[in-house]
Amino acid sequence: MSTDKNRATAAAILPLVGGPDNISSIAHCMTRLRIALHDRSLVDDAALRALPAVLGVVEDADTYQIVLGPGTVARVTPEFEALVEQGRPAGHPPRTAGPAVTAEELADRGAALKQAQKARNSTPVKLFLRRIANVFVPLIPALIGCGIIAGLNGVLLNTGWLPAVVPALAAIASGFMSLIAVFVGYNTAKEFGGTPILGGAVAAIIVFPGIAKVDAFGQHLSPGQGGVLGALAAACLAVQVEKLCRRWVPESVDALVTPTVTVLVSGLVTIFGLMFLAGEVSTAIGSFATWLLASGGAFAGLVLGGLFLPLVMLGLHQALIPIHTTLIEQTGHTALLPVLAMAGAGQVGAALAVYCRLPRNRSLRTTIRSALPAGFLGVGEPLIYGVSLPLGRPFVTACVGGAAGGAFVGLCNQLGVAFGSTAIGPSGWALFPLLDGPSGMGLNLAIYAGGLLVGYLVGFAATYFFGFTRQMLTELNADQEPIPATAPPATEPAMA
């Protein structure tokens, strides 16, 4: 039955994006089906948003993204891919021109659309951060799974239950993290145009136990020193060395020379430079994050929780992904994520206030009812793009709610109750199973729940009393079509 439901969702989406021949590529991330289109004008945005399974749509310079939510997207994507393949005649490539237009006209139209989108969304900083995010996003499912298993193992260890199972769960939870640098190296080389396995091979040097026998900068290196940041740098270097080799090495010996030179040169630079430098940077990041919440407390939480939604809209939150991963690698959890997750709580509170303030706007209230369950679970795109951002003021008051929730969690951290998330990706209620810290699971859960409650209440109150002008209430408090969502730069994962 579940398979039939996913296939039905895929079948409903396909004609609304122009059919099989309008699709040039398909991928998915934590919450979104990402497709590249030949002709953007063939997409029926309104009909897509009206589908029950679709939580929202987002567009960037390269892909059209349909928000389906965690879990659902991983099941719908294979069905969608199968339908696309079935819908293309054998031996026929995807069409490159729509009906009644010439290839030149379509090319001109596509070039104009793409140029307009890139001018709006594709600044060098955003493009770079998006590529960095593409390295880490595929790792999130493993981080989540291993994080939950680590939490379960901690409960068993503290309670003394099933002692024979504890070592096995520890191995399952820790195996991926012990080799995460290899996966980062592999994905980095793949993203930046190199041979993925060579990137993984160079990054593997970082976690090799025998590296402890090597001296660099007057000290023994430690396995894992530099972590994911070192792996990222090492793989980027490997890509550049490989490209140089491909340019200058004769084809007759390329298969032998290029991999050897790439691994040798990149490996030596990694051992005698990058591992030490990345290790210093990683240590500084961990020390700063600990100091920030221990000393800054409520103020740090207020700033982080209040600014996270604007960072998401600008695409700058992607810079936090390697920081979260570094903190998880160092301490077993990232203390920043529970604070940032309060932005989603403010968003939910703001949406509830909009629902109460506009009792006659049935279409908008329907949108809020359908999007709230996802919002409680940390999927904020439907509420952001379908409710608060188009309305304007409620987006600001949602940020106020996030700031209040962040201040609460930050204050508790400053008072000595430090905790974090063992994985990145989920937020809202979905973050509860991933919480970890020295103060014990009960206190961690209570403080995080208290932060969510503060975010809900302040977001609701700020929006209810300050989220509308009289003119807005007059215009909006009537039955009308749903407010069209804007199309800001695509960002993944929001983690709040």
Image (cartoon, rainbow, N blue to C red):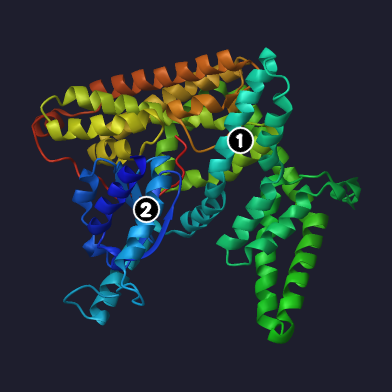
Residue 453: percent from left, percent from top = 40, 17
Image quadrant of residue 280? top right
Callout 2 amino acid: Glu
Residue 90: percent from left, percent from top = 34, 74
Which image quadrant: the C terminus? Answer: top left
Give the structural element (helix, strand or loop) at label 2: helix
Callout 1 amino acid: Cys
Compared to 156, does 235 lie above or below? below
Q: Is residue 92 left or right of residue 99?
A: right
Which residue lies under the disc numbered 1? 146
Q: Is residue 169 left or right of residue 489?
A: right
Give the structural element (helix, strand or loop) at label 1: helix
Asked whether residue 270 is in view, the answer is yes
Compared to 478, does 136 lie above or below? below
The disc at residue 79 is: 2
Compare residues 405 and 52 and report the one nearer the observer: 52
Disc 2 vs disc 1: which is toward the camera? 2
| Mark positioned earlier in the residue sequence (2 or 1) | 2
Image quadrant of residue 148? top right
Residue 434: percent from left, percent from top = 55, 28
Asked whether residue 398 is in view, the answer is no
Compare residues 124 and 378 and report the one nearer the observer: 378
Going 44% across and 42% down the picture, which residue do you hit? 311
